[in-house]
Amino acid sequence: MNLYSISAKDIHGQTVDFSEYEGQVVLVVNTASLCGCTHQYEGLQRIYERYKDDGFVVFGFPCNQFGAQEPEDEPAIEEFVKSRFGITFPMFSKIDAVGDNPHPLFAALTDGEDPVHWNFEKFLIDREGHLRGRFPADMEPREIVHDIDELL
């Protein structure tokens, strides 16, 4: 899987070619506003602020497939994450992470073998665009700082 060959629509519906992020370390997270893990937005924002000047970015992908915990549309999601958590990292349009038609990014990240299990599953991608770590929903963002440090 190479991240840089994939694109997605941002939360405003504009296509983002991930080649724009070539050379950066990327943390991809499938998110949901009504999940018990939603508080992790705070930790994700902290990590983003800490490392963004070192070539690190977080990508948030809202997904309503796990417990229907992201029922709102993109404008409501954006308002929620900005007003509640001060999110400044890139947020994307809602996607399917599993099922018959997962977004190509999540199909590539899971290699079609081990699907996403829940909201706030995290995928760490190195500067060359390759998957270097996968972390479960219940792992707090601060627990993967060491892995981020190694790639930066």
Image (tube, rainbow, N blue to C red):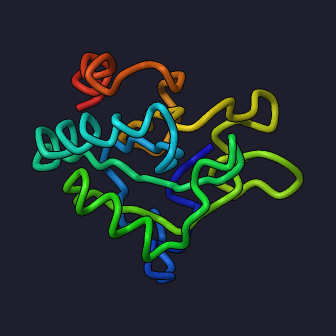
Q: Residue furthest right?
A: 100
User: Residue 58 location in percent, x, y?
Assistant: 34, 48
Q: Is residue 7 visible?
A: no
Residue in the picture at 47% in, 43% down: 29
Residue in the picture at 11% in, 39% down: 50
User: For this rendering, which residue is in front, 103 or 33?
Assistant: 33
User: Residue 17 location in percent, x, y?
Assistant: 48, 71
53 displayed left or right of 89: left
Q: Is residue 37 visible?
A: yes
| Image: 105 above or below 134 | below
Q: Quadrant of the C terminus?
A: top left
Q: How many marks?
A: 0
Residue in the picture at 10% in, 49% down: 53
User: Residue 142 location in percent, x, y?
Assistant: 26, 22
| Image: 66 above or below 20 | above
107 displayed left or right of 60: right
Q: Quadrant of the N terminus?
A: top right
76 displayed left or right of 65: left
